[in-house]
Image (cartoon, rainbow, N blue to C red):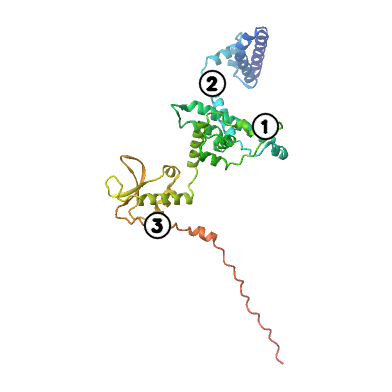
């Protein structure tokens, strides 16, 4: 019996929807668009009714209405639903996924001819489009963040978030290489750019495709942007033993330089630790630095009236001491030492076969 009532209700709703559809099709375009959402929801209600099994009394009560489909739609429209929350969440999730895909797209480091030979044209084209988009993002960021004759600190992170360091630095290196004649780029950045391998990419008309992702902003501002990008990237890299040793040597030289103690109270010699070193140094690098400096009273501290972090030693320390030599890791040493050749096992002497007595 329930099935009969539900079937009758579904058929009545379907007929109501057919009538609504015929009316809607006769309306002008603007009126059709105005009712498009209502039509879609009514279709969903019909779909739900195909599987819904209402109790007999409820199905009969709804069936008694002259327009049960319109009644259900009005009930739905009057309710607070999470529909817009779902829409907003879908937008945010799709945008995040698109950003991840853009940031993780591999950088293709070869020219079009090589890509054609290797069957990599799709990868080449996708990477090339990303290079051009990155170049445009750098220009937009410089324009947005240049004020009061300075480029603020948010300019670089805005682009890195979209494209990552690998592609951003590649586009900047290409820009400096293509504008090697421009004296507004620092010698340091020009020297660095030459270390980045960017093969020529000629087109069939004598042009150079790499010009398509040359940043066209003021060269002085691009140089500032590049300097900050390189510094930010470097701060993310762990310090090498050579860099730790170089910082220790620099600090030792500064501790030796003054003729008299240079601390505020005249009781210690002191030298400021490089901010770049501190930005990259973890606990292990910090400990290694302290072990290299040969002073018993060595301390690392901040000062109340001065910015930065300093190493200090008592005025009575012998500043002529040389840096300590780092101890080699026993584990690493064991790995590097060749294993002695294994001696062949001595065979037990063969027993002499006894001859029978004659």
Q: Mark 3 points at which residue?
A: 322
Residue occupying image coordinates x 48% and y 51%: 242
Q: Report the Cα–Cα distance between label 3 and label 1.
A: 58 Å
Q: Name the residue under label 1.
A: 207
Q: Position of residue 200 (x, y in %)?
A: 65, 38
Residue 124: image quadrant is: top right
Residue 67: image quadrant is: top right
Residue occupying image coordinates x 57% and y 41%: 194
Q: Which corner quadrant holds the N terminus?
A: top right
Above or below, comparing residue 352 to residue 298 in the picture: below
Above or below, comparing residue 202 to residue 318 in the picture: above
Pointer 2 local density, CA inside 10 Å: few below 14, some 14–19, many at least 20: few
Q: Nearer the viewer, residue 138 or 79?
A: 138
State yes or no: discs 3 and 1 in contact (Cβ < 8 Å).
Answer: no
- 100 to the left or right of 253: right
Mark 3: secondary structure: loop
Sequence-earlier tag: 2 or 1: 2
Above or below, comparing residue 13 to residue 225 in the picture: above
Point out the frontmost of discs 3 and 2.
Answer: 3
Residue occupying image coordinates x 62% and y 12%: 33
Point out the frontmost of discs 2 and 1.
Answer: 1
Residue 118: image quadrant is: top right
Q: Position of residue 130 (x, y in %)?
A: 61, 32
């Amino acid at each position: 019996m329930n099935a009969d009532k539900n079937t009758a209700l579904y058929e009545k709703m379907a007929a109501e929807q057919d009538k609504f559809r015929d009316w809607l099709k006769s309306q002008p375009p603007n009126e059709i668009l105005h009712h498009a959402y209502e039509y879609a929801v009514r279709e969903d209600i019909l779909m739900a009714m195909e599987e819904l099994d209402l109790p007999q009394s409820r199905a009969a009560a709804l069936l008694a209405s002259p327009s049960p489909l319109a009644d259900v739609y009005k009930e739905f429209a009057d309710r607070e639903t999470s529909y817009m929350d779902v829409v907003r969440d879908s937008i945010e999730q799709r945008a995040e996924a698109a950003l991840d895909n853009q940031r993780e797209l591999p950088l293709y480091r070869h020219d079009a001819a090589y890509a054609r030979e290797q069957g990599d044209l799709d990868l080449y084209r996708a990477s090339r489009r990303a290079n051009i988009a990155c170049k445009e993002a750098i220009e937009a960021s410089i324009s947005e963040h240049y004020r009061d004759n300075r480029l603020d600190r948010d300019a670089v992170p805005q682009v890195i978030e979209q494209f990552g360091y690998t592609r951003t630095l590649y586009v900047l290196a290409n820009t400096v290489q293509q504008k090697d004649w421009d004296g507004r780029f620092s010698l340091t950045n020009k020297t660095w750019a030459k270390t980045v391998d960017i093969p020529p990419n000629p087109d069939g008309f004598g042009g150079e495709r790499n010009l398509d992702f040359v940043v066209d902003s003021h060269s002085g501002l691009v140089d500032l942007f590049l300097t900050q990008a390189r510094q930010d990237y470097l701060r993310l890299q762990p310090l090498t033993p050579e860099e730790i040793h170089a910082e220790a040597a620099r600090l030792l030289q500064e501790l030796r330089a003054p003729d008299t103690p240079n601390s505020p109270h005249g009781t210690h010699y002191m030298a400021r630790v490089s901010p770049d070193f501190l930005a990259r140094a973890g606990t292990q690098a910090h400990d290694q630095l302290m072990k290299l400096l040969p002073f018993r009273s060595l301390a690392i501290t901040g000062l109340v009236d001065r910015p930065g972090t300093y190493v200090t030693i008592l005025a009575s320390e012998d500043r002529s001491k040389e840096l300590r030599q780092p101890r080699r890791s026993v584990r690493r040493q064991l790995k590097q030492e060749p294993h002695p050749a294994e001696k062949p096992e001595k065979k037990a002497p063969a027993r002499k076969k006894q001859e029978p007595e004659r």
